[in-house]
Image (tube, rainbow, N blue to C red):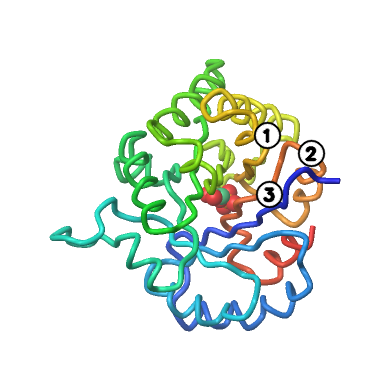
């Protein structure tokens, strides 16, 4: 028996137009219609969110954005707020993805501000953390994960923390075809759960769903999900294909 309900989430990144989104949902929905063993979340790019939410209406599929601004409105050209995402039909939002940290100046401090804004808008944050290859090779994986967690979660109360999902995504495994072994992922997940326990108490840590992300595919999901420490997956490339994503959901 799994201790927690798994979450399988797809992060489309900067892929798919509205028409391609509708095509995906038409193929994907029947393939996961009987999947009640897990929660399913799909994160299209901003312009396709409303169409995705409409296409997913009446199903168990939930829609996530890939980022949000920390304000609710204002003169911030090019930004999108939590209340706007909620109004567009999102229930979740990805925060702190390594590509945002790597290319767009995301820091633990801005991650923290976005997390609070997401919670205030009633969105479920999917917080991404993970070490780079040089950090892993220098034996810093644990300290990096703890720094990112504490930075992101600074000043939250246990009640505020409770809806949050965490994704462990080793940067060296993202888009590289190089997955962490189930053992490596499980070790990192134990570090995360242990730290959450120290920050927010044992009940919060036992309830927390920790997803693994980084080259998750139909052929490696079973091995990952066989570990009780791993509560789901955040899937990039493979989530673009409705058949592959459905195979992952139906692990
Ligand atoms: P990938 O991406 O599955 O293409 O490695 C994972 C992610 O960035 O969430």
Is residue 221 or residue 117 the one in the foreground?
117
Q: Residue at x 33, y 67 (%)?
A: 84
**Residue 69's quadrant in the figure?**
bottom left
Select label 1 or label 3 by which is in front. Answer: 3
- Reply above or below: 169 against 15: above
Sequence-earlier tag: 1 or 3: 1
Q: Which mark is residue 117?
A: none
Q: Which residue is mark 1?
A: 185
**Disc 1 element:** helix
Q: Is residue 120 left or right of residue 127?
A: left
Q: Position of residue 220 (x, y in %)?
A: 76, 48
Q: Residue at x 53, y 58 (%)?
A: 11
Q: Which residue is mark 3?
A: 232
Q: Tell whether label 1 touches label 2 (CB within 8 Å).
A: yes
Q: Which residue is mark 2?
A: 227
Disc 3 from disc 2: Cα separation: 10 Å
Mark 3, other Cα within 10 Å: few <14 / some 14–19 / many ≥20: many
Sequence-earlier tag: 3 or 2: 2
Disc 2 from disc 1: Cα separation: 9 Å
Is residue 15 or residue 230 the one in the foreground?
230
Mark 1, other Cα within 10 Å: few <14 / some 14–19 / many ≥20: many
Q: Tell whether label 3 touches label 1 (CB within 8 Å).
A: no
Q: Position of residue 211 (x, y in %)?
A: 63, 45
**Residue 207's quadrant in the figure?**
top right
Disc 1 from disc 3: Cα separation: 11 Å
User: Farthest residue toward the right?
Assistant: 1
Q: Position of residue 123 (x, y in %)?
A: 45, 58
Sequence-earlier tag: 2 or 1: 1
Q: Residue at x 62, y 30 (%)?
A: 193
Quarter of the image that includes the C terminus: bottom right
Select label 2 or label 1 by which is in front. Answer: 2
Is residue 3 or residue 217 the one in the foreground?
3
């Amino acid at each position: 028996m799994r201790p927690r309900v798994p979450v399988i989430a797809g992060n489309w990144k900067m892929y798919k137009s509205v028409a391609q989104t509708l095509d995906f949902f038409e193929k994907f929905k029947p393939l996961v219609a009987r999947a009640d063993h897990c929660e399913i979340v799909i994160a299209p790019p901003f312009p396709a969110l409303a169409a995705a939410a409409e296409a997913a209406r009446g199903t168990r599929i939930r829609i996530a954005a890939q980022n949000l601004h920390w304000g609710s409105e204002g003169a911030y050209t090019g930004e999108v707020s939590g209340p706007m995402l909620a109004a567009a039909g999102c229930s979740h939002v990805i925060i702190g993805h390594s590509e945002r940290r790597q290319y767009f100046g995301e820091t633990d401090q801005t991650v923290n501000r976005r997390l609070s804004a997401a919670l205030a808008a009633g969105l479920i944050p999917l917080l991404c953390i993970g070490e780079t290859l040089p950090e892993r090779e220098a034996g810093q994986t644990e300290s990096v994960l703890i720094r990112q967690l504490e930075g992101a979660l600074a000043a939250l109360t246990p009640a505020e923390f409770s809806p949050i999902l965490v994704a462990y995504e080793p940067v060296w495994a993202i888009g590289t075809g190089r997955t962490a072994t189930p053992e490596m992922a499980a070790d990192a997940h134990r570090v995360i759960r242990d730290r959450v326990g120290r920050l927010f108490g044992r009940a919060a840590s036992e309830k927390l769903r920790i997803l693994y992300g980084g080259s998750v595919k139909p052929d490696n999901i079973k091995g990952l999900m066989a570990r009780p420490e791993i509560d789901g997956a955040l899937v990039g490339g493979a989530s673009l294909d409705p058949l592959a994503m459905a195979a992952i959901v139906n692990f």
